[in-house]
Image: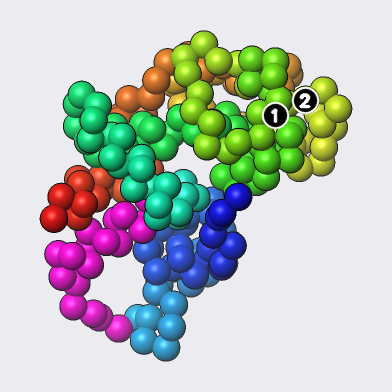
Amino acid sequence: MARYTGPMTKKSRRFGVDLKGNDKNFDKRPYPPGEHGRGRIKESEYLLQLREKQKARYFYGVLEKQFRRYYEEATRKEGLTGANLLILLELRLDNVVYRGGFARSRAEARQMVSHRHILVNGRTTNVPSYRVRPGDVIEIKQRNRESQAILGSLEVFGSREVPGWLQTDADAFKITVIDRPMRTQIDAPVQEQMIVELYSK
């Protein structure tokens, strides 16, 4: 299973956004990394577009080839391609586990899924990119509900708002997918139109 394993704080500083979530190191140094990190560079249109694409990739934890497939699928759907792209990324199982409050980061949610701690409609699913649908019920396996990582995440659950297209029952360790997300319900710090312009060249 391919994934980025490098330093996320460095990427967060490069893009000026906390990609990891609650990254204290980013808060201490919210400027680009490197010796000349605080200096100015010439930002071309291509650089800005590339930066938005890379930001989206690292935000959702997908590699280039997989991200490109999401984009190509988004172009085939009705509506705005950029919004479709973000909706497809939001419907990933690892993202839903994170959004529902069962993990403190998408990386932690991805690990929970790949380690077979998650049930979808009563069946074990270990594919982080699994696409959920309205009506799906995501649960933590009974034997994993006492995990310190999960309990710790639920302790800070109240400080993070669950999007309206999901419903979380913390006592039952259950997330229900109510509907597909709308663009207005997605708080990803990404200008998706720039990604569309980049791939359209």
Which amino acid lies under the numbered mark 1 shown in the image of this protein?
Answer: Ile
**In the image, 143: left or right of 181?**
right
Residue at (56% x, 67% y) in the render: 6
Instruction: Answer with left or right where residue 199 lies relative to residue 19.
Output: left
Q: How is the image coloured?
A: rainbow
Query: Is 79 left or right of 114, judged from the image as shown?
Result: left
> In x, y percent, where is residue 9?
53, 66
Residue 50, placed above or below residue 136: below
User: Is residue 61 shown above or below 179?
Assistant: below
Give x and y (percent) for residue 41: 23, 80
Residue placed under numbered mark 2 in the picture: 141
Residue 82 circle label: none
For the C terminus, give its image quadrant: bottom left
Query: What's the distance in space between the residues labelled 2 and 1, CA to CA?
Result: 6 Å
| Residues at discs 2 and 1 in contact (Cβ within 8 Å) | yes
Q: Nearer the viewer, residue 134 or 17?
A: 134
Counting residues from the N terminus, which is met first, the one under dot 2 or under dot 1? 1
Tell me the amino acid under the disc marked 2.
Answer: Lys
Residue furthest toward the bottom? 35
Question: Residue tagged by mark 1?
Answer: 118
Residue 121 lies in what quarter of the image?
top right
Looking at the image, which residue sits at the far top?
A: 135
Residue at the spot 52% in from the left edge and 11% down from the top edge: 135
Q: Residues within 10 Å of mark 1 (few under 14, many from 20)?
A: many
Q: Nearer the viewer, residue 109 or 158?
A: 109
Q: Does residue 89 appear anywhere in the picture?
A: yes
**Measured along the vertical axis of the image, is residue 158 above or below residue 21?**
above
x%, y% of residue 130? 54, 31
Task: Name the residue located 54 percent from the left edge and 59 percent from the top edge.
Answer: 4
Label 2: state its secondary structure: loop
Residue 51 part of the magenta-drawn span: yes
**Mark 2 residue crowding within 10 angstroms, few (<14) / some (14–19) / many (20+):** some
